[in-house]
Image (tube, grey):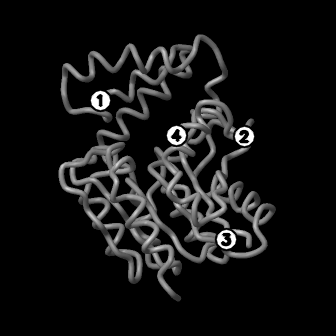
Amino acid sequence: MSLPPLAVLLFTPRAGEITGSARWSAMRMLRPFADRFDVRLVNRPAGLPVTIAMPELAAVYAERFAAAFAGPVPVLAISTGGAIALQLAADHPKLLDRLVLGGTAATLGPPGRRAQRAYIERALAGRRPSPALADIVTPSPLGRRLLRPLLWLSDGASGDRADAVAVLHAEDGFDLRARLGEITAPTLLIHGAEDVVYSLELARQTAEGIPGARLVVYEGRGHSATFTDRRFARDALAFLHEPG
């Protein structure tokens, strides 16, 4: 018997099919979901304009959903992928029947916006951009100093960063707070209390704005630690399998 599909939206620096180490890392995190769902990583195509806005980006994803799925599907969306999923749920509600969001909200918080703008500036200047994200990965000054060289190495020596710039530019201008009431898909938000990319207050505002949405908070967890927490898959799967 075939498993039902689960569309997954993540941020990856490269557009197109997610392959290699990026796919391995994503599927390792999603392993608990693969026992119950046909997990499908949905990603943007290459070559989008670097000035694309979130509604336009969501329209691109809507085309991908329509081509990949026969009807509405549950969606698991994390961080930047969650921002895209929120816009998708507001603009194209017939494509989703249930939505789980991890570490995201209806707009970026100031630290997240600063880090992503620094990433964009470095990328456009031809520099490896990922060290700019160290400030939102750990609050420890020592941890940031140790992390920056590792992030620098993770970028690789070459490559076009335009695809990453495009999606982060869209996220930079994203603010769906005035339209949250239009989202009809049952929604669960899972958030770390120490998240600085999307603050807990913004997550609360988002949950309060979506009719019937629920918010689960992991105390002591930052942005990335929310998704690797053992409770994340358990809580998400319980919601995805609720009747109705």
Cα distance between the residues tagged 1 and 4: 16 Å
Given residues 80 and 3, the one toward you in this image is: 3
**Name of the residue lying farthest toward the right:** 67
Q: Nearer the viewer, mark 4 or mark 3?
A: 3
C-beta proximity under 8 Å, tags 2 and 1? no
From the image, tell me which residue sits under label 4: 168
Q: In the picture, which quadrant includes the N terminus?
A: bottom right
Q: Nearer the viewer, mark 2 or mark 1?
A: 2
Which amino acid lies under the numbered mark 4 shown in the image of this protein? Leu
C-beta proximity under 8 Å, tags 4 and 3? no
Which amino acid lies under the numbered mark 1 shown in the image of this protein? Asp
SS at badge 1? helix
* Among numbered discs 1 and 4, the one appearing first in the sequence: 1
How packed mark 3 is, by other alpha carbons closer than 10 Å (few <14, some 14-19, many 20 or more), is: few
SS at badge 3? loop
From the image, tell me which residue sits under label 1: 135
Residue located 47% across and 52% down the image? 78
* Among numbered discs 4 and 2, the one appearing first in the sequence: 2
User: Please, is residue 223 above or below residue 209 in the view?
Assistant: above
Given residues 205 and 74, the one toward you in this image is: 74
Given residues 190 and 163, the one toward you in this image is: 190
| Lateral position of residue 224 relative to residue 33, left or right | left
From the image, tell me which residue sits under label 3: 4
From the image, tell me which residue sits under label 2: 16
Q: Nearer the viewer, mark 1 or mark 3?
A: 3
Q: Residue 145 appears at what percent x and percent y?
A: 27, 16
Q: Residue 172 appears at what percent x and percent y?
A: 46, 44
Which amino acid lies under the numbered mark 2 shown in the image of this protein? Gly
Q: Residue 46 appears at what percent x and percent y?
A: 73, 37
Cα distance between the residues tagged 2 and 1: 28 Å
